[in-house]
Image (tube, grey):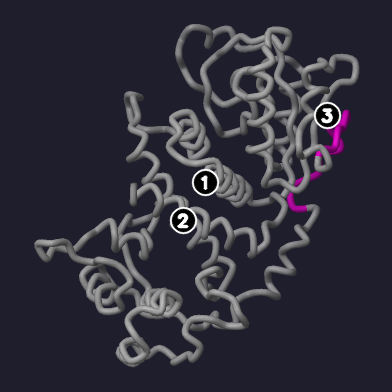
């Protein structure tokens, strides 16, 4: 994946000063070179960000309040924080294209690019024509990801509702599907289900539940066989493993559309879990994006360093998939993002 980034500028939209209103970077910065950079990035449907002396890496969809911070006023402690932010937010990108004007390039940014652990991925450029139209360069990982697609792609089961799913989860000993009073434990069951983004209703795929049981070695072969027969699923030997690979490491999908839909289900669940743990103080509804939630989680130390990095990767994949003409994201990357979103959601719900 590729990201385009430039440094911030002193000229800002003064109508936002002291209002407390949060906006995206294209609404705040008004200097001509910066505005032109942002316009070209949007026109060409690429992933982009601005490096702020106050906030660090500021992705296009994240909102912040008006601020004033000159690079000369950045302390050593603040620089270390900014450097860490640069490294952690951009680590998931293969290429980092940094746009700058050689005649107006502050030493702070030169020091940043020299000090980052990602320096080998950074490419400085000075002409906006070098911003390639999204989709012109095919991600090499796509072909590789297609070759590695799970050979059990046709092993999909019937969709069932919560009551039936709880019974199956309990029978296969995947989780505690019922509470002490005998009522269904909704949060536990939802860890293994999907939420339809349109109807907001939950459903469970029986084939996925059986694969989960196989990977956990729970329920027993006979119980799994009965489940396969009950829902007319093909029987598979091997206890959930194939060629030494855990089948859960690759969600089984019959098409790219299925894979992307599954990913959207999982990042929506992640957003919901983060919003529960990070209540909003904003009036008029919660407008925070996943990027905003990740930053808040870091500030409040809700997640560990590794989980934060994986959450940033999920967000980067989400941004890329939301740009229809951007460079293609391989199936392998989408699958990894699904795994990460699911694992972080479970971590948040289990705390």
**Magenta highlight range:** 122-135
Relative to residue 165, is residue 67 depicted above or below?
above
Check disc 3 and report its element: helix, strand or loop: helix
Residue that mark 1 sits on? 307
Count of marks overlaid on the render: 3
> What is the x, y in percent for residue 313?
60, 47
Toward the viewer: 325 or 5? Answer: 5
Q: Can you tell which quarter of the image residue 67 is in?
A: top right
Check disc 2 and report its element: helix, strand or loop: helix
- For label 3, the crowd category at 10 Å Cα-Cα, with few meaning under 14, some 14 to 19 and many 20 or more, is few
**Residue drawn at the location 85% of the way across and 37% of the way down:** 123
The image's mark for residue 114 is 3
**Residue 131 left/right relative to 262:** right
Relative to residue 271, is residue 105 depicted above or below?
above
The image's mark for residue 343 is 2
**Do tag 3 and tag 1 residues touch (Cβ < 8 Å)?**
no
**Do tag 2 and tag 1 residues touch (Cβ < 8 Å)?**
yes
> What is the x, y in percent for residue 227?
32, 86
């Amino acid at each position: 994946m590729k990201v385009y980034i430039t440094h911030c500028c002193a000229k800002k939209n003064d109508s936002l000063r002291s209002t407390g209103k949060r906006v995206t970077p294209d609404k705040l910065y008004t200097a001509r070179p910066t505005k032109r950079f942002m316009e070209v990035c949007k026109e060409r449907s690429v992933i982009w960000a601005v490096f702020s002396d106050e906030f660090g890496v500021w992705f296009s969809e994240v909102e912040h309040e008006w601020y004033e911070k000159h690079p000369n006023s950045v302390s050593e402690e603040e620089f270390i924080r900014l450097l860490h932010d640069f490294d952690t937010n951009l680590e998931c990108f293969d290429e980092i294209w940094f746009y700058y004007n050689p005649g107006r390039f502050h030493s702070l940014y030169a020091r940043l690019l020299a000090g980052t652990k990602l320096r080998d991925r950074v490419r400085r450029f000075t002409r906006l024509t070098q911003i390639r139209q999204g989709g012109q360069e095919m991600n090499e990982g796509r072909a590789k990801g297609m070759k590695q697609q799970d050979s059990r792609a046709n092993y999909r089961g019937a969709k069932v509702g919560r009551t039936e799913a709880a019974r199956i989860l309990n029978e296969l000993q995947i989780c505690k599907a019922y509470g002490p009073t005998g009522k269904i434990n909704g949060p536990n069951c939802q860890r293994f289900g999907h939420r339809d983004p349109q109807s907001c209703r939950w459903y469970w795929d029986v084939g996925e539940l059986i694969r989960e049981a196989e990977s956990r070695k729970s329920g027993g072969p006979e119980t799994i066989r009965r489940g396969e027969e009950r829902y007319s699923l093909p029987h598979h030997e091997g206890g959930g493993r194939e060629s030494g690979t855990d089948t859960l490491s690759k969600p089984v999908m019959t098409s790219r559309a299925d894979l992307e839909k599954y990913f959207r289900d999982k990042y929506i669940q992640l957003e919901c879990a983060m919003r529960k743990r990070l209540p909003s103080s904003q009036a008029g509804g919660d407008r925070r994006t996943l990027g905003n939630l990740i930053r808040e989680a870091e500030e409040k130390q809700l997640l560990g360093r590794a989980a934060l990095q994986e959450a940033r990767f999920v967000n980067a994949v989400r941004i890329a998939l939301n740009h229809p003409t951007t460079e293609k994201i391989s199936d392998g990357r989408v699958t990894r993002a699904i795994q990460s979103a699911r694992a972080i959601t479970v971590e948040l719900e289990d705390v």
